[in-house]
Amino acid sequence: MKLETRYSNHPNDVKHYTTEELREHFLIEKVFVADEVQLTYSHNDRIIAGGIMPVEQQLTLVAGKEMGVDSFFERREGGIINIGGSGRIVIDGEVFELNYQDGLYIGLGVKEITFESINQEQPAKFYFNSAPAHHHYPHTLITLEKANKVHLGSDAESNKRTINQYVHPAVCQSCQLVMGMTILAPNNMWNTMPCHTHERRMEVYFYFDLDENSNVFHFMGQPQETRHLVVRNEQAVISPSWSIHSGVGTSRYTFIWGMCGENITFDDMDHVAMKDLK
């Protein structure tokens, strides 16, 4: 298991970052590596985000020195959405099979967890988020059909989309992790505009369903001091609580969002008026 650590950044410092420095601190360029657990540990609310891609091997999550515990889920919960072929997750002997776009909530206290693909020719790609937890809630398999649906946006604003809430109070219980997947309607490119911040929580965006010639321009920074990152297929962005998180693609795409922090209220947002963006 590979676990990279990213530290928190003050917004006054970020104003002076070069493109290279912005990418170094906030962009997770490599999420999926064949037969590896590839994770990033952010000091922003202690979220862990990354990819688990078993091909020929069975993979497991272990606790390294960075976590200071005996097992990965000793003081954590987790969420997974599979964006690859069918896969199997075994949690302390309990088996869960995840097809494309199926999700899974993993509760506190798991001792052993393994991941494998059902077909090596079409390996599973388990996108993973984890947050500190204080209470055990039941493991829950969440298909796309079972996810809570919120329809937003319009064709006129190029932001018509369906928010599929997987780990969310309307679907299952969690301590602080909230996670879901937003699917843009055909010919729509904006994900969250007008934009917002949420001072009480941070967020990680994971972009996928892009071809090799397409990009997403992810806008970040304080509303009056915006910056941007050029993001390619299957890359993620760490978004601190003080930063906007909005993007537009050169073609249609899908993204997974994961949040943790002070509360699990999805609509706890500080909206930013279009006229205030700079």
Image: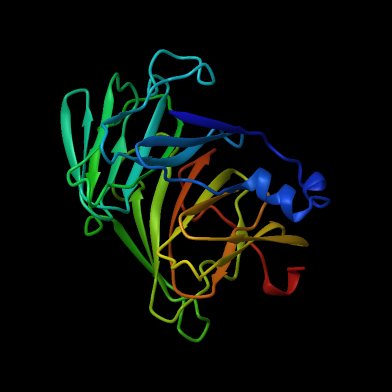
Which x, y percent locates residue 241? 63, 47
Residue 210 picture quarter: bottom left
Is residue 168 or residue 57 the one in the foreground? 57
- Residue at 18%, 47% in the rendered image: 119
Where residue 270 sits, quadrant-wise, is bottom right
Q: Looking at the image, can residue 240 be seen?
A: no
Q: Where's the N terminus, which quadrant?
A: top left
- Image point (75%, 69%), residue name: 276
Q: In the visual, does 256 lie left or right of 262?
A: left
Residue 267 visible in the shown view: yes
- Give left or right: position of 145 versus 152: left
Measuring from the top left, give residue 189's x and y in whole percent. 50, 75
Image coloring type: rainbow
Where residue 228 sits, quadrant-wise, is bottom right
Q: Position of residue 220 (x, y in %)?
A: 66, 58
Residue 47 rendering spot, x and y as whole percentages: 51, 36
The quadrant of the picture occupied by the C terminus is bottom right
Nearer to me, 190 or 168: 190
Q: Count the marks: how many?
A: 0
Compared to residue 215, the image places residue 201 above or below, namely: above
The residue shown at (42%, 21%) is 75
